[in-house]
Image: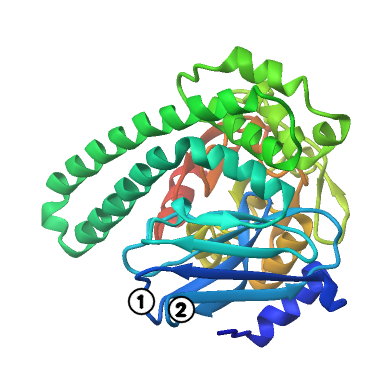
Amino acid sequence: MKTHLPLFVLICCVLFGCGSKGNEVVIEGFIAGLEDGVVMTLNQPEGRTVVPIGSDTVKNQTFMFSYIDSVPQPKRLTIMSMGEGFPPTWLDIWVEPGAKVKITGEDKLLRTWGVNSNVKEQKEWNAFAALTKEYTRQTQAIMRDAYALFEEMDANPDKSTELRAQIRVLYAQNDSLENLIRNEEVKQLEKGNTGSAWLNKLYSQSMAYRYMESYPYEDVLRSLATTMTDDQKNSDMGKTILSNLNPPTVVKEGDEMADTELYDVNDQLHHLADYKGKYILLDFWSAGCGPCIAAIPEMKEISEQYKDKLTVISISSDSKDLWKKTSAEKDITWINLNDFKLTEGIFMNYGVTGIPHYAMISPEGILQTYWFGYGKGSLHAKMKELVK
């Protein structure tokens, strides 16, 4: 079976180029027991989010993607499904021009599916996966069960206390398994720098170091980071690794606001200091963040209602292309900036660990307070409280 959406073909031509059949990438999956009608998506990572670039509907336990790739370098894509019984995660695969990828499995725990191809990075990725397959199977089953409990809680709010307790137990089990996975991956990383797959795993470890209260492999991680090549250090992923290991000072309430070079969608340079004299509401967001997108209409209302006292400034962590595309689609009319450092620049200066994240700056340029998360009406309520 081979289905293609016109949009899929168009986007693949834009992302990967349209060329000869010799550059065709073919991804075929056969998953025993997978029912007809399940929709699988192929995604392109963009910074800290992903962009869906194609989909196929399972028939006879199979799915397939194909496109022409003229960019002569390996890249990581992801495959996932929102179908019933799938964990809220994805399968990583590596492709390059001409790659033929075979995916096999026996259930919906897709991170345990086998991925075979001649792509060097895939073989390296498989070496990591083989060490942690059973742990990974257990974590996916746990997260699938936790996701089902969240859905049950939405349907039965009166049972939320009981269900939250069950979820906490599952999360504790998952944390223990993730620690075992990290231990195995660190040992594999120590075997030597092998390229893109190795760098991706080092990046994952650095993110764990950044967000965990107690990360046990700091010395090893710092040593491994010194073995990155110059090209790796200068890549977005390499810069993130180094930023995670050497984070900048985080501005605290009562401190002078952090500032940096920021650019608008017309590539004009801005600084936050340019907007002193009014309150400044910083909105840290991404195109892949559902609550961030849901907040846009209310953000527009606030930018108009309080324009005499308040300047709203949205700051994106997306790549330039994705940011500009989403900004145009969502008609963001207020000040909308990007430092093009993903989450490693001004996001780190303000201690952003989840989005949407908001920070209120006084007219004098002092950080008054910050909060995160969005619910309908929450921004209006905050402005009534903070804008005097």
Between 349 and 57, the residue placed more toward the observer is 57
Between 292 and 224, the residue placed more toward the observer is 224
**Can you tell which quarter of the image residue 45 is in?**
bottom right
Q: Which residue is tagged 1?
A: 35
Q: Are marks 1 and 2 in contact (CB under 8 Å)?
A: yes
Residue 50, percent across and down?
A: 61, 59
Mark 1 is on which residue type? Glu
Q: Eyeballing the image, is 74 above or below 14?
A: above
Between 340 and 88, the residue placed more toward the observer is 88
Mark 2 is on which residue type? Val
Q: Eyeballing the image, is 313 above or below 207?
A: below
Tag 2: Cα neighbours inside 10 Å, few (<14), some, or many (≥20)? many
Between 43 and 325, the residue placed more toward the observer is 43
Q: Eyeballing the image, is 52 above or below 190?
A: below
Question: From where the camera sits, is residue 362 visible?
Answer: no
Residue 198, percent across and down?
A: 68, 36
Residue sitting at the far top: 219
Q: Which residue is tagged 2?
A: 58
**Helix, strand or loop at mark 2:** loop
Q: Left or right of 169: which side holds 174?
A: right
**Helix, strand or loop at mark 1:** loop
